[in-house]
Amino acid sequence: MTHETILEELEEYCRATGLKASTVCVRALNDSRYVARHLRRLEALDRDAEKIRRFIADNPAKGSGAHVAGNAAGNTAGKVAAE
């Protein structure tokens, strides 16, 4: 499930029931500001992802590709090594 999925589900539910998102969140979470905070977090994630992509573009890996962590058998499972 992506972070956007719950907001999409909530939006669909609100359309179907006529309730406001804040009402659903108060009833489910006792938190009327959940949607606003969730949207701010998503915006921050998007900004951070763009900064990381810009850094990667400006600082290409030396050699034939990105440094990817893995075992001797070459099993990387898509994990980037932290340095």
Image: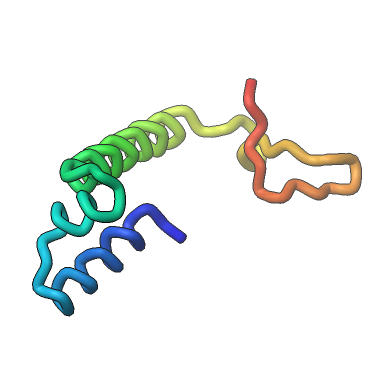
Residue 49 in the image: x percent, y percent? 37, 39
Residue 63 screen position, x and y as percent: 66, 35
Residue plotted at (40% across, 38% down) = 53
Which residue appears farthest toward the right when viewing the image?
Answer: 72
Q: Position of residue 72 (x, y in %)?
A: 90, 41
Q: Nearer the viewer, residue 19 or 69?
A: 19
Query: Which of the image's four quarters has the C terminus?
Result: top right
29 relative position to 32: left or right:
right
**Picture layout, residue 33 above or below residue 20:** above
Judged left or right of residue 8, residue 65 is right
Q: Quadrant of residue 20?
A: bottom left
| Picture layout, residue 67 above or below residue 77 | above
Number of marks drawn: 0
In the foreground, 24 or 7: 24
Name the residue furthest top. Answer: 83
Q: Residue at x 17, y 45 (%)?
A: 32
* 76 to 11, vertically: above or below: above
**Where's residue 46, x and y in %?**
30, 42
Q: Residue at x 34, y 39 (%)?
A: 45
